[in-house]
Image (cartoon, coloured by chain):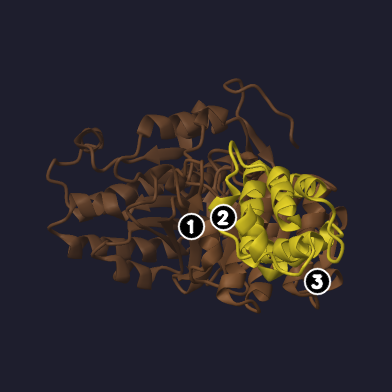
Amino acid sequence: MTTRKSPGLKPLVQVDSEGGTADSGADDLAETRIAAVLGLKQFTQRPVRTLLVKGLAGTGKTTIALEILKAAGKGKGAYISSRVPKELLEMQIPAMKKTLQNHEFLDIRLEDATSALDCVIQLTAKKVRTIVFDSWDGLAKELEPKERLRAEKTLMALANNSGAQLVFVSEEPGATTIDYLVDGILELVRVEEQDRAVREFIIHKLRGTKIPQHKYLFTLLEGKFTFFGPYAIPDYSNVDKFVRRPDIDGSYSFGSGALDRLFGGIIPGSTMAIEYDENVPYSALRTIELPPIINFLSMGRSAILLPLPGANDERTNSILTKTLGKSVVGDRLNILNVVRTSDVETTQMLKNVTPNEIHEMVTRETTRLREKSKDRSVLLVKSVSALENLFASDLDSLLEVTSQEIITLAQSHDAHILFLAKDSPIRSRILSMSSSYAKLFVRDGTVLMFGVKPHTGIYVLQHLEDPTSPSLTQMV
Amino acid sequence: MNSLSATSGMEDFATTFANAVHGGLDKVLGQSGAAAVLSHMKMTSNLPDPAEFHKELLTLFGKEATLSLERAIVRDLVTRLKWALELLSIEGPFDFNTTMLKIQKGMKR
C-alpha cells in the first residue's frame, strides 16, 4: 500500500483500502506536538529564568506549565502545587501523568508562604532545573502587598543565582507585582470565533528574546499543549504520492482523510460551498480544491476545474500530472480558466462572453467528460469569485446559471464544489442553495476551517505530510 | 568610637546580631522570605559567626544579592545600637565580616 515510486515515472496514486486509515489525524497531531515541544525546548534554553503563565480558569495554564516541565528532561524539574494533589492532577490531565511521575511533586496546599519559599530554596540548592509553582497567586493573596513583593523578589533572586527556571502559574488576569519582576509573561485566553471557542496564548514579554509574533493559537487536544505557528506554504517539490480513497457509504471521498472525517464525504448530487476570507492563502484553498479532483480522476471519473482568481495553472497542472500522469489529466480533466481571454478563444467563445455562455460551455464539457467517466459522474470545482470578477455587472445572470448548474448536477448525481469569497455579493443566495458549507479564515497567521453545514468543531489547517492534502487538528 | 560605645544597649553582640539579621532580611526578603532562608540555613535560633553566615548567603543568592542583604543587616544593626552609620568609617569595599568585627569591638568598649 505504501510502496514509494520515483516521481515522474509512473502515476503515484495508491489505493487506501481501509478508506481512511492512511493520513490519520493521530499522525498529524503527533507531528504538531513534536514541533510544539521543540519550540518549548528552544524557549526554555533562552535567557528567560522566570516565567509567568497567567490566564483564567480552564485556559490551559497547568498543561502548558507541565509541557515546560517535560521539556526540562526527566528528573530535572519539580512541581509545587498549592491547588491540587498529584493524584487529582494525574486524573485531570492523564496525558501528563508520566511527566508528573518523572519529576518531584511537592504538595503545599496547607502550607504557608514561608514553607513554599523554603521548598523553592531547597529545590534550587539541589540544582533542580525547572520549578513550576502552581499557583503562586493562591499563596501570594494571603500576603500583604509589601510582603508579597518582597517574597517575589526573594524568588527572583533565588532563580537568578541558582540558574533554575521558575515558572509561576497565576489565575490573576490583571497585572500584579510579579509581572514586573519576571523575565517572561505568557497569557492564555479562550476566545470565541464564529461561535466556536479557540485558545490563544499571548507573549507579553520575553526578555532577551526576539518576539516575531506575539499571539499564537493552541489546542489542548488529547490533554496536550500544541501550538500553531503561522501557516506555511507547502513544498510542492515533495509531491510524491496520493492515496486513492474509495467511496464512503455511497458518498464520494474528498481525497483527503482529514476532510472525509470532518464532512463524511461528498453526497452525489450535492453542492458544497467553501467560503474564505481575503487573508486565506491560495495554497490553503488549493489543498481543499485539489484532493477531490485527484481522487475523482484516480477513481476513473472526470472533473472540471474553474480555478480561483490568481491561480497558477502551470503549478496546478504540474501537481496533477505528477500524481496522476499526463494521459489521465489530458483525458478526463478540463481546466477552464474563464478569466483569461485566451481560454475563451480556445473554446471558440466570444470575447464578450455572458454567464449563460459559460454555463453552456460547462454543460458541454460535463457531457463530453461524462462519457469518459467510469460511472458517468463528474466533479465540478468552480470559483465563484472568478466568475464574479468576469460578470460584475450581471450578477443576477450569474446567480441564475449557478442555480441551474446546481439543479442539473444534483439530477445527474455529480459533485459540485463552489469556492466563494466572504464578501461575495451573491454569497447568501449561493449558500442557501448549497447542501454543505465550510468556512476558512485566518487568525494569528493560522488558517482555520470549520463546517457550518454540517456543524463541526474548528480545525487548524496545515500541511504536515502531503503538500496537496490538508492536515486538520481540532481546537479544543 | 567612644561615642558609639556610649549608645550601645544591654544586649550582647550575638543577640543583637541575630535580631539584626532577622530585621535586615525581613526588610529585603519579607517575613516569609527571611524565615524560609533562616530555616534553610538552620539558623532560626542560633546564628553562626558572620563569616559563616556570609558564605551561606552567598551560596543561596550570589554576590550582588548577598551584598544587598548584608548592607540591610548592617543598617538594621546600627539602628538597633542607635549608632550613626558613617561613624563606622569603613574604608575600601564593603566586607560583612570586617564590618561585624568592627561593630563587635565598638560594643565591647
Residue A108: mark in rendering: 3
Circle 1 SS class? strand
Mark 2 lies on a secondary structure that is helix
Same-subunit check for callouts 3 and 1: yes
Chain appearing in yellow on the rendered image: B
**Residue A111 in the image: above or below residue A314:** below
Q: Could you classify mark 2 by the number of other residues whose Cα lies within 10 Å: few (under 14), some (14-19), or many (20 or more)?
A: few
Residue A405 in the image: state x and y as whole percent: 34, 60
* Chain letter for mark 3: A
Which residue was labeled with disc 1? A448
Which residue bears the numbered disc 2? B85
Q: Quadrant of residue A163?
A: top right
Instruction: Decide if residue A318 is in sight here.
Output: yes
- The chain carrying label 1 is A
Q: Residues under labels 3 and 1: Cα distance?
A: 41 Å
Q: Position of residue A6 (x, y in %)?
A: 64, 21
Q: Residue A303: which numbered mark, if any?
A: none
Q: Position of residue A115 (x, y in %)?
A: 79, 68
Is residue B3 or residue A386 the one in the foreground?
A: B3
Select label 2 or label 3 by which is in front.
Answer: 2
Q: Quadrant of the N terminus of chain A?
A: top right
Question: Label 3 amino acid?
Answer: Ile
Please tell me the colour of chain A.
brown
At label 1, the amino acid type is Leu
Reply above or below: A371 against A417: above
Q: Which residue is nearer to you in this view: A172 or B3?
A: B3
Q: Is residue A323 left or right of residue A397?
A: right
Q: Amino acid at mark 2?
A: Leu
Residue at 80% across, 75% down: A111
